[in-house]
Image: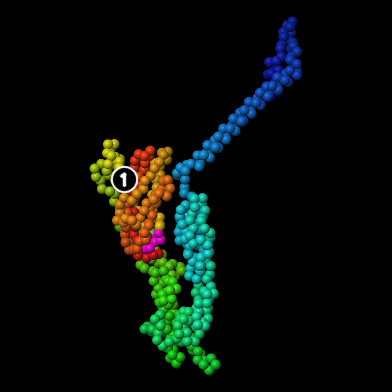
């Protein structure tokens, strides 16, 4: 292309004359003049190229600045999936409670009997996709380090527990009781299954007797017997804490924990967990109703939409949601009625620590449409006043807060609403009907 361009320039610069019928090429412009013209054209083209390149650079810079400013807007991506945190595993010899890793969710850890937790017992998922706190570990508790055996007793470490080998004339889980003819209040005496003959041996012309673990010596040296130690009663009298989360059952030489109906015993053999009858298909809900799992049981529900009146009527769009039919243009009462009515069911344990967030209510605009610029939240109905509070957690979310502890069994209902405003003008109202079943247990 460069050679062709130069030839065209030379053709334009040279003059051709016709003389005597013969074509002769007159002397063209001086070679230095041609080179000078070509260099001027080359400089002109380079100048155009630099201006074009600078224009592109400025345009790219402005586009990058615009993109950064848009990405920082709080409503830049309302449809983006919620941030999640990495999954957490239960520590060895421990249990994890909580299986959701979305922002705002919490995960809790406890240790099996004989272990104590080191690290964070509760961790929350933050907005940046990381967990609060530090990793939890379950560290073995050396029971004998605290010298629990009294009156010359010897402590023997076991698996997640310890036993005291008591000196003569002393008995009990900590060798705290003198051997006596009158049975202690924590001893089982009236059932043959809880009594055993001692193991005796002659040592240095003297007879020494001992009992199996979980039994203590009772009676005189000539007529002794091993009586069962009621561990459940010993822990209660010593105020050493509860052996079992729910109920302790004494058995010969030991004890076991039991759970109420609708709960199952966990792997630590002392804690209880609710049985989800809905998930395991252990319910008897009829067709047309929905099974809702509650603490210790289940409910079969089929919520109904508000009754029609005047120009206001509703249609059920899902098992737990009703939507208002379109309103006549001139019906103010219809426009003021709730646009949606939703139904929610919660299960709470007794004496739940307060304040506790129970329910969140939020708005979301349809794609391509701007949402409301103002929201108002409130409690508009139910059978319990003063127990709950409704507050705003961010620009588009309200929270139902439990402010007083509840003791079950009892059932509570509460209605909360969310009103949308645009330029201080009412747009729509949404009502959530929350039904709460409080279990009589605190687990």
Q: Position of residue 351 (x, y in %)?
A: 38, 63
Q: Is residue 339 above or below residue 345?
A: above
- Residue 352 among magenta residues: yes
The answer to which of 42 and 50 lies nearer the viewer is: 50
Measured from the top left, where is residue 255 in percent x and y? 42, 76
- Residue located 72% across and 8% down the image: 18
Circle 1 — which element?
loop
Range shown magenta: 348-354
Q: Residue at x 55, y 93 (%)?
A: 204
Image spot of residue 93 (x, y percent): 51, 67
Circle 1 is placed at which residue position? Answer: 338
Q: Is residue 258 above or below residue 297?
A: below
| Residue 428 lies in quadrant | top left
- Pick out the residue farthest to the front: 386
Q: Is residue 48 left or right of residue 227?
A: right
x and y percentages locating residue 269 in the rendered image: 44, 70
Q: For residue 225, which quarter of the picture?
A: bottom left
Rendered-image quadrant of the C terminus: bottom left
């Amino acid at each position: 292309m460069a050679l062709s361009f130069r030839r065209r320039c030379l053709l334009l610069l040279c003059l051709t004359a016709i003389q005597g019928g013969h074509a002769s090429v007159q002397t063209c412009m001086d070679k230095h003049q041609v080179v000078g013209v070509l260099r001027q054209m080359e400089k002109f083209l380079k100048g155009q190229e630099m201006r074009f390149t600078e224009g592109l650079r400025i345009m790219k810079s402005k586009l990058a600045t615009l993109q950064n400013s848009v990405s920082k807007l709080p409503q830049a991506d309302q449809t983006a999936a919620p941030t999640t945190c990495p999954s957490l595993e239960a520590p060895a010899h421990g249990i994890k409670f909580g299986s959701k890793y979305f922002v705002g969710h919490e995960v809790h850890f406890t240790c099996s009997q004989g272990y104590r937790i080191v690290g964070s017992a509760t961790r929350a998922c933050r907005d940046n996709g990381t967990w609060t706190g530090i990793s939890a570990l379950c560290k073995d508790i050396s029971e004998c380090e605290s010298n629990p055996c009294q009156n010359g007793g010897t402590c023997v470490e076991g698996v997640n527990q310890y036993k005291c080998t008591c000196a003569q004339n002393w008995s009990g889980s900590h060798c705290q009781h003198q051997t006596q003819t009158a049975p202690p209040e924590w001893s089982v005496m009236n059932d043959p299954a809880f009594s055993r003959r001692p193991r005796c041996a002659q040592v240095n012309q003297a007879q020494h007797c001992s009992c199996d673990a979980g039994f203590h010596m009772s009676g005189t040296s000539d007529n002794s017997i091993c009586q069962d130690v009621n561990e459940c009663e010993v822990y209660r009298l010593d105020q050493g804490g509860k052996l079992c989360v729910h109920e302790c059952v004494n058995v010969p030489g030991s004890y076991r924990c039991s759970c109420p109906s609708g709960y199952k015993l966990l792997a630590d053999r002392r804690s209880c967990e609710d049985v989800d009858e809905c998930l395991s298909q252990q319910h008897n809900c009829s067709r047309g109703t929905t099974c809702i799992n509650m603490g210790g049981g289940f409910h079969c529900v089929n919520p109904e939409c508000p009754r029609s009146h005047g120009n206001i009527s509703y249609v059920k769009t899902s098992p737990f949601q009703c939507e208002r039919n379109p309103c006549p243009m001139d019906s103010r009462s219809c426009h003021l009625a709730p646009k949606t009515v939703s139904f929610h069911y919660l299960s709470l344990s007794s004496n739940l620590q307060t304040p506790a967030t129970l329910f969140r209510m939020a708005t979301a605009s349809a794609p391509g449409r701007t949402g409301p610029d103002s929201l108002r939240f409130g409690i508009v109905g139910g059978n319990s006043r003063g127990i709950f509070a409704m507050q705003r957690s961010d620009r588009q979310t309200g929270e139902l807060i439990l402010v007083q502890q509840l003791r079950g069994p009892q059932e509570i209902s509460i209605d909360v609403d969310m009103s949308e405003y645009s330029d201080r003008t009412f747009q729509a109202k949404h009502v959530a009907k929350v039904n709460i079943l409080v279990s009589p247990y605190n687990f």
